[in-house]
Amino acid sequence: MMKQNTIEIAVKNMVCNRCIKVVKEELLKNKFDFIHVDLGKIYRSEALSDTEKVLLIEILHAEGFELVENKEAKVVNQVKALIITDIHHKKGKKSTQNFSAFLASELGVEYSSLSKLFSEIVGNTIEHYVIEQRIERVKELLIYNELTLSQISYDLNYSSPQHLSRQFKQITGMTPTLFKKKGNRKKLDTI
């Protein structure tokens, strides 16, 4: 969260630290005024002029990102950013709080409303999105080959390595062991 007097601009598909770096570099290269860039957000000290908005849309589009302009899409973008941050960017054991309580608390909106909105806009449930993100994180950790499946299941709050393996196979069609041999990950912004 930035200070009260900053303007927050939502950006679709900005889902990793490399995305943040690319957006920052492009904003600097184009001498675009901003305070800070975070997952799915650009912070400014003042609202966009029409000219700045057109420039920003061009900058983002050239790098595969989109400006999010309607309120509902911004909320969905925030949900995705919170989930991605929690699963992919937090170190150590993840929160034991379930995602419904976590999202409702972070966004100050009842989970049932978030869930309905997310499903309408994305065409999938928040729960399925969380599972897909967790499986992508499992894939990443398997490729690194630094943790056992038990350690991975613990870090990602699975009830057991068997539960992780069942869910992994359900989503990918292969076991974690087979995946380790083949190694094939999706880009986060395509999930």
Image (cartoon, rainbow, N blue to C red):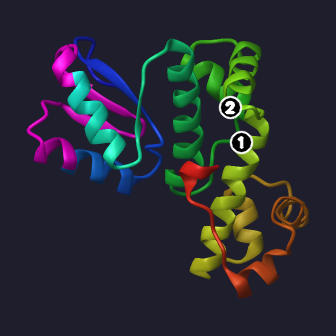
| Residue 38 lies in the magenta stretch | yes
Q: Residue 115: percent from the left, percent from the top?
A: 74, 22
Instruction: Check the image and name the residue furthest to the left.
Output: 31
Q: Residue at x 56, y 59 (%)?
A: 187
- Locate residue 151 relative to residue 166 in the image: left or right: left
Q: Residue at x 35, y 39 (%)?
A: 38
Instruction: Check the image and name the residue furthest to the bottom.
Output: 181
Q: Which residues are magenta?
A: 26-52
Type of the residue with mark 1: Tyr
**Which of 149 and 48 lies nearest the eye of the viewer?**
48
Classify mark 2: helix, strand or loop.
Answer: helix
- Locate residue 159 relative to residue 64 in the image: left or right: right
Q: Is residue 65 above or below residue 126?
A: below
Q: Residue at x 78, y 37 (%)?
A: 127
Q: Is residue 185 above or below residue 183?
A: above
Q: Is residue 146 visible?
A: no
Residue of label 2: 122
Q: Residue at x 69, y 12 (%)?
A: 110
Quadrant for the N terminus in the image: top left
Q: Residue 9: percent from the left, percent from the top?
A: 34, 24
Asked whether the residues under the numbered discs 1 and 2 touch, taking CB atoms below 8 Å apart as contact, a structural biologist would say yes
| Residue 18 lies in the magenta stretch | no
Type of the residue with mark 2: Val
Q: Count residues near mark 1 (Cα–Cα under 10 Å), then give few for <14, some for 14-19, many for 20+.
A: some
Q: Residue 112: percent from the left, percent from the top?
A: 77, 15
Classify mark 1: helix, strand or loop.
Answer: helix
Name the mark on residue 74.
Answer: none
* Of marks 1 and 2, the one in the foreground: 2
Q: Upstream in the sequence, badge 1 or badge 2?
A: 2
- Locate residue 47 relative to residue 88 in the image: left or right: left
Q: Count residues near mark 2 (Cα–Cα under 10 Å), then give few for <14, some for 14-19, many for 20+.
A: few
Name the mark on residue 129.
Answer: 1
